[in-house]
Amino acid sequence: TILILDFGSQYSHLITRRIRESGVYCEMLPCTQKISDLHFNPKGIILSGSPYSVYDQDAPRVDPAVFKLGVPILGICYGLQEIAWNHNGSIVPCDCREYGHALLSILKNQDHLLMNKLFENLEGDIQVWMSHGDQLDKLPADFRVIGKTSTSPYAAIAHEEKQIFGIQFHPEVTHTPLGKEILRNFVIGICRAQANWTMESFIDKEIARIRQIVGPNGQVVGAVSGGVDSTVAAKLMKEAIGNRFHAILVDNGVMRLNECETVKKQLGDHLGINLRVVQVSDLFLNRLKGITDPEKKRKIIGNTFIEVFEAEAAKIDQETKEGNHGEIQYLLQGTLYPDVIESISFKGPSATIKTHHNVGGLLENMKLKLIEPLRELFKDEVRELGKVLGLDEELIWRHPFPGPGIAIRILGEVTPEQVAIARAADHIYIEEIKKAGLYRKIAQAYAALLPVKAVGVMGDKRTYEQVIALRAVETSDFMTADWYPFPYDVLKHISNRIINEIKGVNRVVYDISSKPPATIEW
Ligand code: XMP
């Protein structure tokens, strides 16, 4: 394992990403991590960048014990400065903040061969990405320069005996095209870490960990939605503890067309997960009566969900008491690594994980502890894991679907009639996107039902009916998004089908707003 100590740079998680791409397992911990408290022996340590300056009053500091461990160390940007600061180097503010592309001249040293290893197989000038306000202006004792740019004379430095390296640029971003090679040189060539991190090894390790946490009789509950994260997490639990994991699917009446049936087939029949479906559409739709405000809808659905989920878990607890099982002590959650990273910030005690895709209230009410088997993975790794665990391609690539479902895609009151229209339109839309081979090119697509009526003509008759708005976006992080440039003939075909096949709709519009300032959901 390679240890990455995070000083809060916006790029820190990319270091983890790039190293894992080389098949080497690494973990990122806050920079304040005490070395004596580590639960593993790192083969090497990377110090990340940071928005701070090493001379700031409240600058984050590394445990000096890292320099006594005797394992290779690589400091990136602030990490380089932190190394220098710990070795009596001198750091000064740059005349002007350096941000953007730069050319790094690699300097090889004939007398000190070990330190050439960071740039092994690289020669001459390479393109790198800089983003810093401070830089080194005096080398610490026994360090040598192994790379420079026109503005940074000490852009890369190394200590031969101690195997400590510092680089001012960011190898983890794609703007440093050979950055991945440099990181690989460090973790494999210098730290001698093994490139043996595969999904199969992850599964074995995680199953063992779950079994140890849950114990031989412990039970776990978890909500599933049919999305890739909750399904992969559920399948992993099933592999670890079999039927002592109870998956609960709450049919809230605002899922997509046939969705409940599909999830039952996929998770229950195909993946063999111990699944309970709670059919409570009427309860949800009753509570949504007369509500038009989207935030109120979200609250009602969230609270009702918690109520239903708790009741079902209590039932399971009761039913399994007769068997030899212990109480339910854990709640499964499909939290991914980017959420964990946000919450391990060194600024104060760890912030809570984003609440909007969690069922936060459950934890407090039910006195459950969280179990998060995907907390080390990125989304694309979860997809890969899903493949190894036998999930269907269709499920693996499913667009995200919000918890409050089509209730927030029906603008205005949510009635069974409106649900039927919105569902039918969404179904046609997604079906046609798939037929056109565009589903995987689009990050998220859905049809919204607008609370307005428009005039139309059908046959010889005037109509006065509702409007469907189509939304499709391209995005990688869902924080910003662009509308998808559909070929006209695909849009034309979708529009024809929706208007012809769905009673009550006489007009289809396409949403051409990007996020920001619009959001993905209406
Ligand atoms: P926005 O609309 O904020 O959406 O641009 C960003 C992503 O979040 C999803 N989303 C939700 N997911 N409960 C959820 O579980 C919600 O209340 C909710 N609102 C938005 C949205 O579908 C998109 O993927």
Image (tube, rainbow, N blue to C red):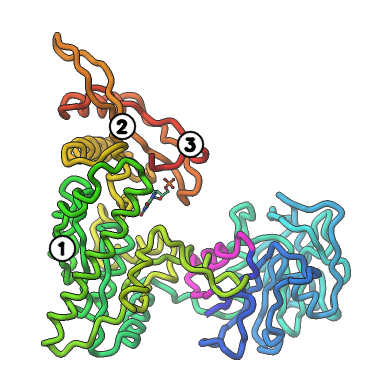
What is the x, y in percent for residue 463?
19, 17
Please identify the residue farthest to the top as the structure is shown: 460
Residue 229, image quadrant: bottom left
Q: Is residue 451 magenta?
A: no
Which secondary structure lies at badge 1? strand
Q: Amino acid at mark 2?
A: Leu
Label located before the other in sequence (2 or 3): 2
Q: Residue 450: which numbered mark, if any?
A: 2
Q: Which residue is mark 3?
A: 514
Seen from the viewer's position, the closer of residues 75 and 497 is 497
Of pointers 3 and 1, the one earlier in the residue sequence: 1
Between label 2 and label 1, give the one nearer the viewer: 2
Residue 110 position within the rendered picture, expressed as x and y whole percent measured from the top left: 79, 74
Q: Amino acid at mark 3?
A: Ser
Residue 451 x %, y %? 30, 31
Location of mark 1 (residue): 277
Work out whether 333 lies above or below 256. below
Q: Which residues are magenta?
A: 9-27
Of discs 3 and 1, which sits in the foreground? Answer: 1
